[in-house]
Image (spheres, helix red, strand yellow):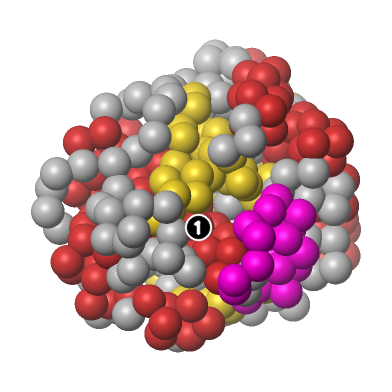
Amino acid sequence: MKKLVALFLTLSLMVVTLAGCSTGTEESSTSGSTSGESNTSAQTDGKTITLGLTAPITGTHAEYGVGFQAAVEIAMDEINNAGGVNGYNLAVEVMDSKGEPKETSDIVRQFAENDNIQAIIGDFTSSCSMAAAPIVDEAGIVLLSPTASNPDYPGMSDYTFTVMNNQSTEAPWFARAVVGQYIGAKSVAVMWLNTDWGIATHQYLLQGFEEAGITVVADESYAENETDFSSVISKLKSTDPECVVILDQGNVPTVINQIRGTGWDVQLATLGPGSSEQLIQLCGENAEGLIVDTPSFLTPENEEAVPFIDAFKEKTGYAPTDHSLCAYNSVYLLAESIKAIGDGEITREAIKDNLKTAQMDGLAGHVEFNEEGGCSRELLILQVENGKYVVKEDYGYGVE
């Protein structure tokens, strides 16, 4: 884990984190508010640059949306307490998309029509981000998603970017390295979320299984609002696979609990939720042995991560995942883009142009954008042991 070289040296990150994030005064971050600017410490001359945040503050993906808001506020407090960016404070207007593409589109359109909003962070899912892509393309405003990993998303517009790993590389790696090498399975059953993200991830996962010589004995999809997975589970169980792979985010705890509720002790692996602490809390003993992948894993043993972890827990009550860290990095990447403008006029177009070359090294590893605005990051295998995620260091980081 490297220090946040590109921007963090300038902003004295580790000093201001303790000064700006441990006061416990920013109650708005845990209130579930759906709109309005967040409270951030003002240390500059009063000039403000406002960013929009669209995220699922409520709904199935609320853990991640609330995490987005907390992480964005932490980053902005650090930056503002260090003097801001080129003499400007950063502020954020937060709106709740509920994880629904139509809601995201409406929110992004409002942001785009508001001349005070200079760039937009969000949304959580690929479906929501892709629905908003034509809007930002027409309006000429950046949409920087912390987590959209559908390979088609970043190329939809010159204004669409993502910090998350692309599923065209992650899903095949998951098939080969996680299921084939680490688990050692020769047969697998797959249940997947039928959304833009799920469809793309599923496609690349199957390619990975084929390349690794792993037999897919069952393959079942389901709708995002589904709550009863008994029929899908019954079909998978009848094929007796060595491993079940779940492609989802917010529904994963429900799926796991229903699988274990049938008495089926098959090996479980999931691509999507990362190292979600709430997943373990909701599943309890049912999560034991679960295998996940993630681009980064923050622990108190990493001293550089402690200020962020503590500030995040104070706001949300739970530990951050890589998804939240990507939202945190999104603020810093946009700040770096604004900083590069110097004394020039701060415009949406200038932010977009500078974002293309912005990069940073930090708690999430190295982040920079490819020509389409996408990202490729290394991956790590974790397994739940005695109620905690454990890094499988023998496998380490890497994308084959």
Report whether 160 appears left or right of 261: right
Q: Nearer the viewer, residue 79 or 68?
A: 79
Question: Which residue is rendered at x = 38% and y = 76% of the image?
Answer: 11
Above/below status of 115 relative to 360 = above
Q: Amino acid at mark 1?
A: Val
Task: List x then y, in percent, for residue 162.
Answer: 68, 55
Asked if the stretch drawn in magenta spans residue 80, the answer is no
Name the quadrant of the N terminus: bottom left
Residue 16, visible in the rendered structure: yes
Asked if residue 375 lies left or right of residue 92, the reply is right
| Residue nearest the viewer, comparing 351 with 267 | 351
Q: Residue at x 77, y 64 (%)?
A: 353
Q: Please state which of residues 332 and 363 is positioned toward the viewer in this rendering.
A: 332
Residue matched to label 1: 331
> Would you place residue 398 above or below residue 180 in this image?
below
Please tell me which residue lies in front, 267 or 271. Answer: 271
Task: Using the rendered view, name the quadrant where residue 16 is placed.
Answer: bottom left
Could you say which quadrant of the image residue 257 lies in? top left
Residue 104 appears in the figure: no
In the image, the segment drawn in magenta is 342-359
Neighbor class of circle 1 (other Cα within 10 Å; few <14, some 14-19, many 20+) is many
x, y percentage for residue 97? 56, 24
Position of 223 with respect to 62 (left or right) is: right
Q: Position of residue 386 (x, y in %)?
A: 26, 57
Residue 205 picture location, percent across and down: 78, 52
Judge left or right: residue 132 versus residue 73. right
Based on the picture, tell me whether residue 352 belongs to the magenta stretch: yes
Q: Is residue 277 above or below residue 27?
A: below
